[in-house]
Image (tube, grey):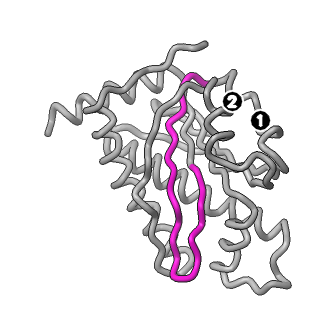
Amino acid sequence: MKNIIELNEDEKDCLQELMNISYGAATAAISEIIGKFATLSIPCISTISSNQLRAYLDQKLPTEHTYYVANQLVNGYLSGENIFIIDEISSINLAHEFDLEEDEINDNEIQDIILEITNILSSATSGKLASLIDTSISFNAPHITKIHSLDEFDKRFEGEYNQVIIIATELHFKEQNIKGELMILSKNESSIFLKKALNNALDNL
């Protein structure tokens, strides 16, 4: 098993605070795009080895459900890959928030909406986090896959990355609660950079 860069309690608390701020930026961006007031629940953050990712998903998500998995590569000192996973029911609810009528909702429309939301969540969250720790990052265009069970979840993530930061949240609108998981996958060098940056932030408190 690959080594994981452990965060102590102070570092986890610091990351939690920075992610709260970063998610505020993402919420504002989503509200502006959709033209509706949206809130993101306070993110629950946990850090696991990439080898534990599938077991985590098995525990958190029903195995025999349909999911959309959108991923976006991140470049820079915080390089890695952001993954947003959302179930089909939440995806349809999300389409309603874009004011689509029932006869307009189809798989292509849903995938376009998820890609747009993923791009906002990923770039706003990671981009704001990067700015808070005084670095810069860039993003590739996101891609999306539809899977019909967790057995189809891409196993390459376990081999390519050392560590996964899981940010579990719900996107709330007036009528809908939309559940999704944003996961930030990183290699050791990026995790080491993040750990040092968190300690710098703690020293400046």
Q: Position of residue 79 (x, y in %)?
A: 53, 32
Distance from Cα at disc 1 to Cα at disc 2 = 7 Å
- Is the residue 81 above or below the residue 94 in the image? above
* Circle 1: residue type: Asp
The 10 Å Cα crowd at callout 2, few under 14, some 14 to 19, many 20 or more, is some
Task: Quarter of the image for the N terminus: give it.
Answer: top right
The residue drawn where x is 57% and y is 39% is: 74
The residue drawn where x is 15% and y is 36% is: 204
- Is the residue 118 above or below the residue 82 in the image? below
Q: Would residue 5 be found to the left or right of residue 15 on screen?
A: right
Q: Would residue 87 be found to the left or right of residue 190 on screen?
A: right
The residue drawn where x is 66% and y is 51% is: 85
> Which labelled disc corresponds to residue 89?
none
Q: Which residue is mark 2?
A: 157
Magenta region includes residue 172: yes
Q: Would residue 76 be found to the left or right of residue 53 on screen?
A: left
- Is the residue 43 above or below the residue 4 in the image? below
Q: What is the span of residues highlighted in magenta in the rendered image?
A: 161-181
Element under disc 1? loop
What main secondary structure does the magenta stretch of the protein show?
A: strand
Task: Quarter of the image for the C terminus: give it.
Answer: top left
Q: Would residue 203 be found to the left or right of residue 93 on screen?
A: left
Magenta region includes residue 142: no
Element under disc 2? helix
Q: Which residue is mark 1?
A: 154
Q: Position of residue 197 (x, y in %)?
A: 31, 30
State if disc 2 and disc 1 touch (CB < 8 Å): yes
